[in-house]
Amino acid sequence: MTRKFLSLKILAQSILGILLLAEVSMADTTFVNIELVPTGTLTGSAQLQGESNDAGVFVYVSGTNIVGATDSDGNYVIVGVPYGTYTLTATKPGYVDQQESGLTVTNPGQVVPVPSMTLPTAAQTEEEMFAEALKLYSYNYFPEAITVLHSQLSTYPSGLYAPAAQYRIGLAFGQTDDYDSAVSNMTRVISDYPSDDLVPDAYYWRGSYEDAQLDFAGALADFQYVVTNYPSNPIAAHAQYRVGRVHEELGNTAQAISAYLSVETNYPGSTEIPPALYNAAWLYYTGDQYTDAITQFDQLLTTYPNSAEAAKASFYKGMSYYNQEDFDNAITAFSSSITTYPTGDKLVDAWYYRAHSKYKLESYTYLDAKADYQYIVTNFPGSDKVPHARYYMGNCEYYLDNFPTAISLYQDYLTAEPDNDWVPQATYKIGTAYYNDGSYTDALNQYVSYYTTYPANKNAGDAHYWAGRCYERLNGSTNNVDAHTEYCTVMTQYPNCSRVFDAETRRDIVGDPSCP
């Protein structure tokens, strides 16, 4: 194997990690430059010798990632070219490249005409064809790359670059989501070139495409084959991780956890370790195995604190404590998450559940919890946690017996979040706050409004009961027809209400010991 071939093969393998990029279609004009600097335009034509259709000539701008493509007449326009002096290279498989140098952009919006170029036909070596295909692939021209690679294999079926060409065809089909063709071409690499260095990669990618097709059995077999037969290959750690993913997709939780943990054990230093640890911890978490989840989240946070998974791990460590009602440790974990990962996507959730933990702990006051809820409302106004944070601010004041303040906060919640799922509960709590504050007329009006609006809500029976109590407070307990009616409503229409026994007792006090 020549040194030149090795360099091309390394180039080919260096691109294999580029998956699921947006497909770029051939067009008359290609817009590539995204830098916010003054730019101009290059325009010209490039013809193919002896051809009537000049489409598909690629024109590269030296020193940039900017490329244009000709239309059927050979014309191209390349916009967004920054200030500078450039060389254009026109290229197409089967033709000799042509260049124009000294093209300078000096003014914003300047249009620089490029002299016409004609590309003469040329016989290409296998190496040249493969290099051309790699160039097309690197610019995301996958169908064009496939065409060149097929031509290469047809011209040089036993050539030095044949295995790499077959492999690259499989990758290119994968990039266009043609998984059947991708699997077929990777299978050809495995069967036609069993001793080639690319075979482990072919097994891995075939497994990936089978996974995308929901062929989990096939994917699992291919990933496991790599792990078992090529344990020292760089792709093996990725395959071990994917074994865990497929087991997870199949619902094999224990096997998935074991596979994920094997990544760290068998492939120290692998980039797959942080996501593998996180996934293992997540499976423990979703299986209510919170102690094991905490262990794995801690392992991730201790060893890989700057990984992409660390912020989520920090939050879910707190949730693991929270779900066990270990609120002291939950507060510590949530506080660490807030401080250590202030830009993490679970930041608001950490504030919210830290507030909940304080809300539930007697060692913190309701004002401590309210401060966290208020922080969410003030600093994250667009978060989906804001409505419930507003509601809990009212609850905090309610349980401190600050009923006027609680009522005001509940009313703020109703005004700001009229369609939220907790509106009925807040409406009911306003009535109870009025009652506890001795404002029985306001309380009665609130209870009546509540059970009229939400007659099937779980608190409707309680609202009727407390409306009866309001009537008693306002009109006395002797021959109180309104109170009697409310208590009878509780007994006859809400037999499962927790206040049925109390309603029966009060009914007998205020009037006839029977109901209509």
Image (cartoon, rainbow, N blue to C red):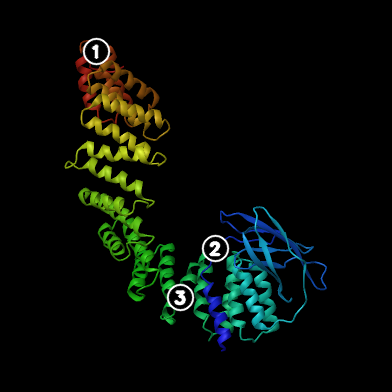
Position of 38 relative to 275 (above/below):
above
Q: CA distance from mark 1 to mark 2?
A: 71 Å
Helix, strand, or loop for circle 2? Answer: loop
Q: Earlier in the sequence, mark 3 or mark 1?
A: 3
> Do the numbered discs 3 and 2 sit on residues whose CB atoms are within 8 Å?
no
Q: Earlier in the sequence, mark 1 or mark 2?
A: 2
Could you classify mark 3 by the number of other residues whose Cα lies within 10 Å: few (under 14), some (14-19), or many (20 or more)? some
Position of 168 relative to 457 (above/below):
below
Q: How far across and down, in percent of the image, does residue 194 sit?
A: 54, 85
Q: Residue at x 23, y 39 (%)?
A: 368
* Residue 235 circle label: 3
Name, please, the residue furthest toward the left. 363
Position of 11 relative to 332 (above/below):
below
Q: How far across and down, in percent of the image, does residue 357 sit?
A: 24, 44
Q: CA distance from mark 3 to mark 1?
A: 79 Å
> Do the numbered discs 1 and 2 sit on residues whose CB atoms are within 8 Å?
no
Helix, strand, or loop for circle 3? Answer: loop
Quarter the C terminus occupies: top left
Quarter the N terminus occupies: bottom right
Residue nearer the viewer, 377 or 115: 115
Q: Residue at x 28, y 15 (%)?
A: 441
* Residue 474 circle label: 1
Disc 2 designates what residue?
20
Q: CA distance from mark 3 to mark 2?
A: 18 Å
Rendered image quadrant of residue 249? bottom left
Mark 3: which amino acid? Ile
Could you classify mark 2 by the number of other residues whose Cα lies within 10 Å: few (under 14), some (14-19), or many (20 or more)? few
**Observer able to see residue 461:** no
Mark 2: which amino acid? Leu
Mark 1: which amino acid? Leu
